[in-house]
């Protein structure tokens, strides 16, 4: 199994509070991704990173920011959480940005915004 | 039209039968194709990758790709109750961009 650890695994918080989710990898892979998974929508890309301090937006980036200060860590921050951000969040990694590299996923974080 | 389409199911098959899961995609420049298995409450797990037209076999799993018709399928032979899960099709159009279908739920009946 790919060495990907997400923390926390579960979180309940209130609307308006900031929330940070962490993804840690031990594979030394260059690319890291944050997805959210919601019924009927599948996996949707929030942000991705192609190296330390190199990040870019995905299709559903509004309300989210990311940071990557080390190869192994990729942080996702909800600046002011809203109920629409209640979801399951998955971190994924891939060795490079070439199309034949599959992604591998962490165990996910179940986030509830009340 | 969704970029990657899958029938949501559930697809029910008896134990020991062949399960056939299908996926169509809209962008002809798609280059790589992946099948993931996701058990309820768990994360997606890669089971097959396919990059060129034809069949690719790995144990009980066979992936089939037809770029001209823009579909990719997954066959599971000798289906077991432990194969009951949601199967996600993913398509890569180059570099970082992976597009996922919403998945097909498979139920293998003992």
Image: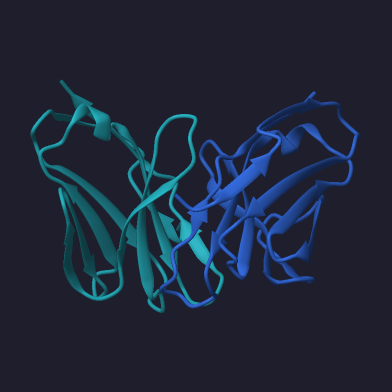
Chain colours: A blue, B cyan
Horizontal side of residue A73 vs B99, given as left or right: right
Where residue B5 appears, as percent x and y from the top left, is 38, 53
Where residue A48 appears, as percent x and y from the top left, is 67, 63
Where residue A38 appears, as percent x and y from the top left, is 58, 38
Instruction: Out of A113 and A67, give the one closest to the viewer.
Output: A67
- The residue under the point 39% across, 44% down is B103
Instruction: Out of B34 and B1, give the one closest to the viewer.
Output: B34
- The residue under the point 67% across, 62% down is A58
Horizontal side of residue B14 vs A44, given as left or right: left
Number of numbered discs present? 0
Picture quadrant where residue A37 is located: top right
Look at the image and tell me in which quarter the C terminus of chain A lies: top right
Where residue A63 appears, as percent x and y from the top left, is 82, 50
- The residue under the point 82% across, 36% down is A82
Picture quadrant where residue A107 is located: top right
- The residue under the point 72% across, 57% down is A73
| Looking at the image, residue B25 lies above or below residue A78 | below
Identity of the residue furthest to the top in this view: B110
Instruction: Out of B88 and A69, give the one closest to the viewer.
Output: A69
Identity of the residue furthest to the front in this view: A26
């Amino acid at each position: 199994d790919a060495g990907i650890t997400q923390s926390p695994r579960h979180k309940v918080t209130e609307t308006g509070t900031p929330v940070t989710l962490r993804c840690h990898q031990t594979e030394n892979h260059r690319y890291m991704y944050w997805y959210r998974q919601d019924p009927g929508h599948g996996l949707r890309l929030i942000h991705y990173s192609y190296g330390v301090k190199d990040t870019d937006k995905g299709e559903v980036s509004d309300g989210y920011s990311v940071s990557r200060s080390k190869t192994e860590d990729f942080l996702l921050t909800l600046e002011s959480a809203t109920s629409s951000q209640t979801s399951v969040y998955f971190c994924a990694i891939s060795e490079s940005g070439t199309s034949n590299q599959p992604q591998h996923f962490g165990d996910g974080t179940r986030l509830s915004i009340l | 039209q969704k970029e990657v389409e899958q029938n949501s199911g559930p697809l029910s098959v008896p134990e020991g039968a062949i399960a056939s899961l299908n996926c169509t995609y809209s962008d002809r420049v798609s280059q790589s194709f992946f099948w993931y298995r996701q058990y309820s409450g768990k994360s997606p797990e890669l089971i097959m990758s396919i990059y060129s037209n034809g069949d690719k076999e790995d144990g009980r799993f066979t992936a089939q790709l037809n770029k001209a018709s823009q579909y990719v399928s997954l066959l599971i032979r000798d289906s077991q109750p432990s194969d009951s899960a949601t199967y996600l099709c993913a398509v890569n159009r180059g570099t970082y961009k992976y597009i996922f279908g919403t998945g097909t739920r498979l139920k293998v009946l003992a």
